[in-house]
Image (spheres, rainbow, N blue to C red):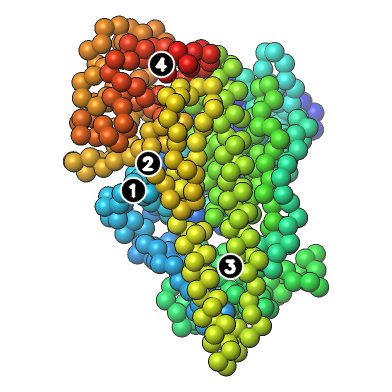
Amino acid sequence: MLVGRRVLETRLTASVLIVGGGPCGLMLANELGRRGVSALLVDEKPGTAFNPQANATQARSMEHYRRLGFADEIRREGLPADYPTDVAYFTRYAGHELARFALPSSSRAGELIKGLSGSWSAAELPHRVSQKYVEAVLRRHAERLAGIQLHYGHRLAGYTESNDGIVGEVECLDDGSRFQVQADFLVGADGPRSIVRQSLGIVYGGETGTQRDFMGGRMLAVYLRAPDFYASIPHAKAWMYNCFNGDRRAFMASVNGCDEFAFHTQLRPGEDESAITINEAKAAFQRACGAPIDCEVLSFLTWTAGHALVANAMQRGRVFLGGDAAHLFTPTGGLGYNTAIEDAVNLGWKLASVVKGVSPATLLDSYEIERRPVALRNTDYARRFADSLGLFAPAPEIEDATDEGSEARRAAGLYLEQHARAEFNIPGITFGGRYDGSPIIVSDGSQPPPDAANVYVPSACPGGRAPHAWLEDGASLYDLFGFEWTLLQFGDTASAHAGMTDAVRGLGVDLKLVTLPASLRDLYDADLALIRPDQIVAWRGSASQAGTIGRVLARALGRDANDGARLAS
């Protein structure tokens, strides 16, 4: 073999080459590997994240982790089981508490979810856990899957695309050696400065450079250890600590519930990010505390808030974009990482269906059609939350020991409590993303509920998340779904239909028939409902339409994108 920076004779093969080993890339590797589809992932970092990064896993992501079998493992990561996940606001952490939005610990979440209905009718509640822990779990599970190869400490040096596929050239950062990867498809999940996106000439569109008193402009992120923090402040524990004053605005997430924190503060005019030292990072934390609480700075970096950006396209030929490479958020609402997870879920089953020959390559066109509108929706919600928090400025007297100061704190507390409820109780955003207008969704002419951040109305209107229910035996309806396709029948309406089994078998589809009590029919307002691998309702119909299941499946698999009107009739 040749050595140095020249191409080695080694050529590896995989169905999918994934660039980026963060949540999106790792989740995609899990989705593909579980379906027996090979993938090779490369990432320039030496391993999964050291810094905490995102800190909130929404309930929908937890439902997908449950589908893959490791939601409980994720829920055990991060904070102790009995640690409260409250969002709290202070003048400074050792100063006045202004507002608090109480949220349950992870141990209580498992108990509470079975008693909730309406907007929070779900298999899982959110979990407050730093991304570094989530990535480690995703990596462990991906490494166990046959056909999945993870190459950290490697970068994509270049690639070529042809009618036969993708040939990528991968470089090892340690010694400069290179090898080639022959793949059918390439997925760029390589972050906001995505090499893959740049290679396609695709640019972001949307809003950037927004300046706010907070969450707009340059931010300093400090990962720190402060063993004396809890003992030094006169307040109950929280998951998210917000600092609200005219001198040092900040937010801080508890990472392990013991001594590690992810601290973020807005840089003020005159603060030179290029000259920040460890001592200055430590001083910024202490100013937010309002007390000389000792800490060890584990790492620090600067980043920019004020983005609400979505790539103008998410696919070109055999190349796809996901995660931050496709959309860039200001982190209010915690929507960036969770949107990335759903990108991977959506793309994963479709790539697998095409690789296995079940669907034509045109199925993949539905990825951008479905996911880009959701990215636009979610970045807009995150921008609104950033405006709500960042444009609300503290009164100059808010820290004063005066009647005026007391009134300023009272008024700020009322506003911040309302804001917290709006930003952190978001079932509508979590569950309400829809794929209306997709060519592989068979509309029945019904209208979905209005899209609202803080209210979710369960609906089986095709194109949205399948309504959830807890069954009489305590099981989640989602746990009955097949890993691939599921046909729900309420009562025995389809299983005896002549020819249905043969039609499904002829499509080469793994379809599980689930019979539910007729008492649950009202939940779906139909006799039958076809559920996609990503738990989205693809179609619903009456008992008299059971004979169309073969054609419905063909449409949902991308085989017959022009048959919707006839199937819906």
State if disc 2 and disc 1 touch (CB < 8 Å).
yes
Dot in front, 2 or 3: 2
Residue 26 located left or right of residue 471:
right
Name which residue type carries label 4.
Answer: Ser
Amino acid found under the numbered disc labelled 2: Pro
Pointer 1: what residue? 118
Residue 494 lies, in percent from the top left, at 26, 17
Query: Spatial distance from mark 3 to mark 1, Cα to Cα?
Result: 31 Å
Q: Which circle marks residue 569 in the picture?
A: 4
Q: CA distance from mark 4 to mark 2?
A: 24 Å
How many residues crowd around disc 3 within 10 Å: few (fewer than 14), some, or many (20 or more)? Answer: many
Position of residue 400 relative to residue 275, above or below, is below
Count residues near mark 1 (Cα–Cα under 10 Å), then give few for <14, some for 14-19, many for 20+: few
**Residue 481 is drawn in which quadrant?**
top left
- Using the numbered discs, state the Cα–Cα distance from disc 2 to disc 3 in whole angstroms: 33 Å
Q: Which residue in the structure is indicated by mark 3?
A: 251
Label 2 close to label 3 by CB (< 8 Å) = no
Residue 51 is drawn in which quadrant? bottom right
- First in sequence, mark 1 or 2: give its number: 1
Of residues 559 and 154, the one drawn nearer to the viewer in this rendering: 559
Question: In what quadrant of the picture does the N terminus appear?
Answer: top right
Q: Position of residue 190 (x, y in %)?
A: 66, 40
Return the residue at label 2: 458
Dot 1 falls on a residue whose secondary structure is helix
Q: Nearer the viewer, residue 88 or 549?
A: 549
Query: Residue 293: x, y in percent?
Result: 57, 81
Q: Amino acid at mark 3?
A: Phe
